[in-house]
Structure formats: structure tokens, C-alpha cells
Amino acid sequence: MAYSILQSVLGAVSTAATCTATYTSNLSPGSKLIAFVSEDINVTFYPSGVALNDTAATALANIAEVLYPSTTGGLSVWVVDTPSDAVGTKPTVTATLSGSFGSVVGIMEVSGLALGSTAAAVIDGTYGTDSGSASPAVSGAYSDNYTGELLVGVVGDPGNTTTYTVSGGSWSQLFQTTANSAAQLVVGTQNSAGTGESFSWAISGAATWGSILFAFKLAAATGTPGPVQSPQTWSRVAVIGGRSGRRGASHSR
């Protein structure tokens, strides 16, 4: 099953104890909601919670995070499967912070992704992180196992009034704050390659930054495996009804 990005919204940068973003189209059943939070804070580095304003006040779960250099804040990723009471509505996602600092949240709704709200359930492999204080912003080491998954690159900073250039490979910018002094967030996407992944995005000036890179697993199956590395990885041949066929040679969706 292929994924589809149904909508994405970048919220306004906030200097209050919360930051929000609101979906602009009605949510669909079976989709997954994703939130990226960047904050400039030196008390508690990640939001104490991220939640929808649906009837149940559904909480999103944290699946990835990285600190900015010199205890200047952090970047985190949160997910939840779209709850039934939110289907057909345009809910707001709110990140609650430990104080009134700069922050921003960007949100997505995506169909075709694996169910669950833990890193093990939704991420192909172990996410990569990095951080630095000069251009370019780069990803940490990360490898996925299948092609055609939703590969997400995320960069944030504590408000450096710089801009990032999302380029290289097939990266496409989903959204980016614009030279903001309170907090910044950049998200890019492309299809996974089933192997080692990376990005290197130029920054217009001096900046301390953090990055996260990973691929979301697809629903129902595992996607198309990456390149075969040795003959031993080929599946065995079975004889069925007098005809031979390779068992497990490919996986269709």
C-alpha cells in the first residue's frame, strides 16, 4: 500500500507556553497524524504533551527527539492514529511547554502508514539524529530496509533568523519557518531507498541546529525490500502442482 500526504500545516511561531497548528481539511478515517515541534527553551527540552482538541483530548506520542547544542532547546516528533471522534473535523494540535519560550509546531495527515504510536511500530529501523552550529545542517546515520516508504528529514533551531535550502536527492520541502528569531522548523520528504539515507541542507547564516531522519513504515506489509546483498538472501524455490515458483521473491501491495 502506498502512502499519501493528505495535508500539512505549519503553525504560527509562538512565544507563549503553548504552540498550535490547525488542520485545514477534514480528517480521514485510517490516517495518521504527525506533529513536529521545535522549541527554544532551557528548562525542559521537550513539550510536556502534544494533544488534539477532539472530544477525548487525544494525546500524541513522542517517537523521536534531539537536543540543540548548548542546551538551547530541542526538536521532537509526535504521532497518533486518527481517532474516530476526530474524523470529519479539523482539529487543532497543541504542544504544551514548560514555560513561555519560542516554539513552533508543524503537522501532517498521511494515509497508508503502519498503525501504532511507538517508534518500534511506525519507524523503519532506528532514527538518526545530529546537531551542530554551522552550515550545512546534516542528518545523522540512518538506514531503512524498504523502498517507497515515507522518508522524513526534520531540522529545527532555537531561532537563528536564517533560512535553509532543502536540496539534493529527491528531497521536497514540506514547510519551513521564515528567518524567525523565536524558533525555526524545516521538514522535507522523499521516498525511501531501502538503504543508507542522508541529507545536507545549506543554511544562510550562523545557526545552532538539530536534525532527525527516519522513514515511516507502510501499512499492511513491508514495502519493497532494498537491494539484494548476497545470493544467500534469495528465497527458496518451491514446486507447486508440478510448476516451480520463487517463494517470497516480491511483495505487492
Image: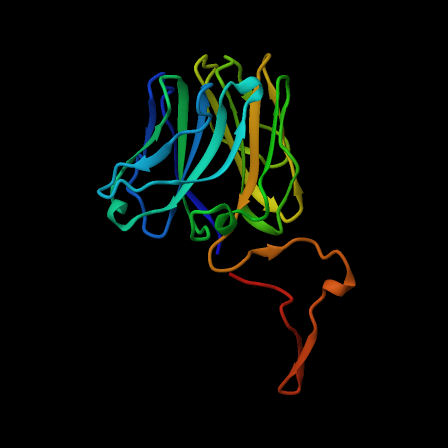
Q: x%, y% of residue 198?
A: 64, 36
Numbered disc total:
0
In the image: residue 217, left or right of residue 147: left
For residue 177, say whether it is visible: no
Of the pair 4 and 141, the residue shown nearer to us? 141
Q: x%, y% of residue 206?
A: 60, 12
**Which residue is at 59% across, 44% downward?**
126
Q: Residue extending furthest front?
A: 43
In the image: residue 78, left or right of residue 240: left
**Which residue is at 39% across, 17% downward?**
101
**Which residue is at 72% across, 63% downward?**
233
Of the pair 43 and 78, the residue shown nearer to us? 43
Q: Residue extending furthest bottom?
A: 242
201 over 49 or under it: above or below: above
Q: x%, y% of residue 173?
A: 51, 30
In the image: residue 233, left or right of residue 213: right
159 over 144 or under it: above or below: above
183 over 87 or under it: above or below: above
Quarter-of-image position of residue 209: top right
Color theme of the render: rainbow
Of the pair 208 and 242, the residue shown nearer to us? 208
For residue 13, say whether it is visible: yes
32 over 73 or under it: above or below: below
Q: Residue extending furthest left?
A: 55
**Which residue is at 70% across, 73% downward?**
236
Q: x%, y% of residue 160?
A: 51, 13
